[in-house]
Image (cartoon, helix red, strand yellow):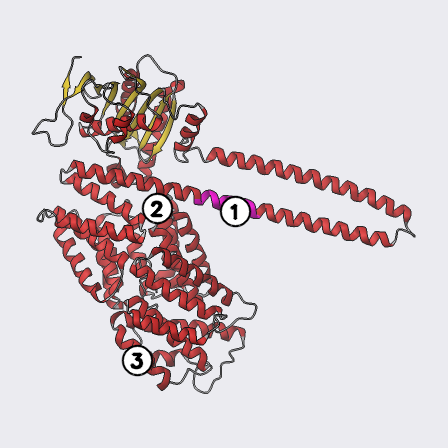
């Protein structure tokens, strides 16, 4: 049922099935009786009814009012299939009506269907009824953008489905497909919120249920959810492997919906490796499949993927695709999908240079929808796309604003995922520790039982009893010693885990957490003393897009190694995030400018040789400063010092990249409050008169000491510097 994002329902059978014909297909052949109490037959019956509900939902996507009316009449005019009780048949009919109404946003019909479900279980003791109600409410909340309700209701639904399907005696009330849908909803909700570790866990659980149901279509879509989460977590090779594992099942079955999802995932996750012609071929195949299936939401989602494909090369075509998709969704409710369509609509209007305000209005509409629904991952991706488009249009200020907003949001998402990963590890350790404790308790209980047995023989076997007690004491001592040893090992493992959490997995450098801990230990966080160098690899996105993520990883590793060789014992080199590196010089050196120059030449003078032998020229832009600053009595903390160096980094990028800008002196008029008042993308002109900057350009080996001067009327947003000599 669920498609490319949470809430997209689609049929799992190749073609639409009329409800009457579907009822017959779900029933056994005439003359045969199905004993509901038989375990295997019960599970098969529940699976058949689930497929029947899928067929009705698929038809309800196109004509919800007609299908709802037909299902209401079927309750009184159509007898249940052979072997299906009247109560279970009414339950199935109202379960389908609740989901169809939820998808169409038909609130009165949804309330009516939920009311009938409550009548089946007025005391709310039946887990399946509770699960169906929660699933319908989660479906409606997802499509209306209510993330909190969607998450809580989907969680309640999957919990109650588990109670029914994991009972000791199998029941026809068990719907593995409905259980899968609730888990898939949880995975997709976590994915759009940027909780990729949780999303991967929910998708893995859903995949197990699909395998239990022997439904390859659902299994493929669960695997695609795992691949999306792996890709978002930077596990690109694992994501590709997950995709490749699904080739055989999709090709072996005519599962149109699963194949459609798989084609779109191939184009999206393989963007860096696949030629554009291949991406277009896969998206075109997905479009043809969506037309054959006849599901409006699936068609709109494929149109969105095609619009992103054409956005930069043919923005008018992208705009047409988005407008067609928005018109097709007017009869339905799908806030998450509509938000993405409005965002691409705005980008296309910007590229077409439509009247001022059109594109910005669409971008703002999408941002409001994302913020209201908590779709932080979509919002971060949208800000990244907007930053690229504004930079292409020469609107540097807007590009930097979106870039900084994306960085802040991505840092929060990464922190949430790190915490989730650590919680997952702690849970695994706790489970293992609990198992050891249970084993220990079992052994202790066995020993106590043996002691009681021997006490009954103490009169006749005094000598043997004494010997046995001695033996027991030795065993207890050995067990205690072993328990202490296991505890020490666990403490050691936890210590190693803490160390690993402070290192970057790719480069082996320290990460932000390690730097922060070092600063706190050295009491330098409130009043910072030392040198800061902040570097960013120039055009790193082009390297990833043109050479692939493997080449990008190789560049990051090589840059890290060169930094370590140049800096040596003078400071701490860390990977600050993405393609950014930070060098903290805790022992002030004679000239931070000289160190910055050596770093620029060490990275930019010698090309990086990739695994295939290709030599790639790599340069960096840098901002640096030595604190406390000359001529300034202001005592700046770490965050303020880093903010000033970050401004210099982006000034270096604005001036053409491949250079270093250093803060020599700071205007006496600039103190902590003035630094706090600076915007995240403020120009260095804001540092005021009396501020001196050093600029070194690697290609010309030109070193200058400059002072900020008023921006030239013809210079746009670029930095204008007036030389003060040298």
C-alpha span from label 2 to label 3: 43 Å
When the figure is inspected, residue 286 is found, relative to residue 53, above or below; the finding is above
Residue 600 sits in which quadrant?
top left
- The 10 Å Cα crowd at callout 3, few under 14, some 14 to 19, many 20 or more, is some
Q: Which residue is mark 2?
A: 232
C-alpha span from label 3 to label 1: 49 Å
Q: Residue at x 33, y 64 (%)?
A: 140
Magenta part of the chain: 420-431
Q: Which residue is mark 3?
A: 70
- The 10 Å Cα crowd at callout 2, few under 14, some 14 to 19, many 20 or more, is some
- Is label 1 or label 2 in front? 1
- First of labels 2, 3 by sequence position: 3
C-alpha span from label 1 to label 2: 23 Å
Residue 37 drawn at (x, y percent): 54, 77
When the figure is inspected, residue 541 is found, relative to residue 352, above or below; the finding is above
Left or right of 347: which side holds 18?
right
Q: Which residue is mark 1?
A: 427
Q: Quadrant of the N terminus?
A: bottom left
- Is label 2 or label 3 in front? 3
When the figure is inspected, residue 676 is found, relative to residue 126, above or below; the finding is above
Residue 281 visible from this viewpoint: no
Q: Nearer the viewer, residue 256 or 366?
A: 366
Q: Residue at x 51, y 44 (%)?
A: 426
- First of labels 3, 1 by sequence position: 3
Q: Quadrant of the C terminus?
A: top left
Residue 285 drawn at (x, y percent): 24, 60
Q: Secondary structure at mark 1?
A: helix
Residue 717 sits in which quadrant?
top left
Q: Nearer the viewer, residue 556 or 232?
A: 232
- The 10 Å Cα crowd at callout 1, few under 14, some 14 to 19, many 20 or more, is few
Q: Main secondary structure of the magenta part?
A: helix
């Amino acid at each position: 049922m669920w498609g490319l994002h949470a809430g997209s329902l689609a049929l799992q059978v190749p073609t639409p099935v009329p409800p009457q014909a579907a009822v017959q297909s779900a029933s056994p052949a005439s003359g045969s009786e199905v004993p509901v109490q038989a375990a295997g037959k019960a599970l098969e019956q529940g699976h058949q009814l689930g497929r029947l509900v899928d067929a009705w939902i698929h038809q309800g996507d196109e004509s919800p009012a007609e299908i709802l009316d037909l299902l209401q009449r079927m309750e009184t005019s159509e007898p249940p299939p052979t072997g299906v009780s009247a109560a279970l048949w009414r339950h199935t009919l109202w379960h389908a009506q609740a989901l169809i109404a939820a998808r169409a946003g038909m609130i009165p019909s949804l309330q009516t269907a939920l009311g009938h479900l409550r009548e089946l279980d007025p005391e709310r003791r039946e887990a399946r009824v509770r699960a169906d109600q929660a699933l319908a409410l989660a479906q409606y909340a997802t499509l209306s953008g209510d993330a909190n309700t969607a998450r809580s209701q989907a969680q309640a639904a999957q919990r109650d489905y588990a109670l029914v399907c994991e009972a000791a005696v199998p029941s026809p009330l068990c719907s593995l497909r409905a259980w899968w849908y609730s888990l898939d909803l949880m995975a997709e909700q976590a994915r759009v919120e940027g909780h990729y570790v949780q999303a991967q866990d929910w998708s893995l659980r859903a995949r197990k249920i699909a395998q239990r149901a022997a439904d390859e279509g659902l299994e493929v879509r669960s695997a695609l959810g795992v691949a999306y989460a792996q890709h978002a977590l930077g596990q690109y090779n694992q994501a590709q492997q997950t995709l490749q594992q699904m080739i055989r099942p999709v090709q072996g079955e005519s599962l149109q919906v699963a194949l459609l999802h798989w084609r779109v995932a191939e184009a999206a996750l393989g963007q860096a490796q696949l030629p554009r012609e291949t991406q277009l071929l896969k998206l075109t195949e997905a479009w043809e499949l969506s037309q054959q299936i006849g599901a409006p939401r699936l068609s709109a989602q494929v149109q969105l993927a095609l619009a992103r494909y054409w956005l930069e090369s043919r923005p008018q075509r992208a705009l047409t695709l988005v407008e067609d998709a928005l018109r097709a969704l007017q009869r339905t409710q799908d806030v998450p999908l509509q938000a993405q369509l409005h965002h691409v609509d705005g980008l296309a209007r910007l590229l077409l240079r439509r009247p001022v305000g059109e594109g910005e209005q669409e971008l703002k509409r999408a941002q409001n929808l994302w913020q209201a629904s908590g779709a932080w991952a979509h919002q971060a991706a949208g800000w990244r796309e907007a930053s690229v488009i504004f930079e292409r249009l020469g609107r540097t200020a807007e590009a930097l604003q979106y870039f900084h907003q994306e960085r802040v949001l991505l840092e929060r998402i990464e922190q949430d995922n790190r915490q989730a990963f650590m919680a997952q590890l702690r849970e695994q350790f706790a489970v293992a520790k609990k198992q050891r404790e249970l084993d220990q308790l079992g052994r202790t209980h066995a020993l106590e039982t043996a002691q009681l047995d021997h006490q009954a023989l103490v009169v006749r076997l005094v000598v043997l009893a004494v010997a046995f007690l001695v033996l027991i004491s030795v065993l207890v001592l050995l067990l205690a010693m072993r328990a202490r040893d296991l505890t020490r090992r666990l403490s050691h493992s936890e210590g190693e885990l803490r160390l690993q959490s402070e290192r970057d997995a790719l480069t082996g450098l320290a990460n932000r957490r390690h730097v922060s801990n070092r600063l706190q230990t050295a009491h330098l966080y409130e009043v910072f003393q030392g040198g800061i160098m902040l570097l960013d690899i120039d055009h790193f996105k082009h390297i990833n897009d043109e050479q692939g993520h493997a080449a990008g990883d190789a560049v990051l590793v090589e840059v890290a190694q060169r930094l370590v060789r140049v800096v040596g014992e003078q400071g701490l080199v860390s990977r600050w995030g993405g393609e950014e590196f930070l060098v903290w010089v805790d022992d002030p050196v004679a000239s931070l400018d000289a160190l910055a120059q050596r770093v620029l030449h060490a990275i930019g003078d010698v090309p990086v040789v990739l695994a295939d032998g290709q030599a790639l020229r790599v340069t960096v832009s840098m901002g640096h400063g030595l604190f406390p600053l000359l001529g300034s009595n202001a005592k700046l903390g770490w965050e303020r010092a880093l903010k000033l160096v970050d401004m210099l980094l982006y000034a270096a990028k604005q001036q053409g990249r491949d250079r270093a800008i250093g803060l020599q002196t700071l205007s006496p008029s600039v103190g902590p409050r003035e630094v706090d008042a600076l915007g995240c993308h403020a120009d260095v002109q804001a540092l005021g008169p009396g501020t001196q900057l050093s600029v070194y350009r690697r290609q010309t080996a030109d070193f200058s000491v400059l002072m900020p001067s008023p921006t030239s009327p013809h210079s746009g947003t670029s930095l204008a510097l007036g030389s003060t000599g040298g």
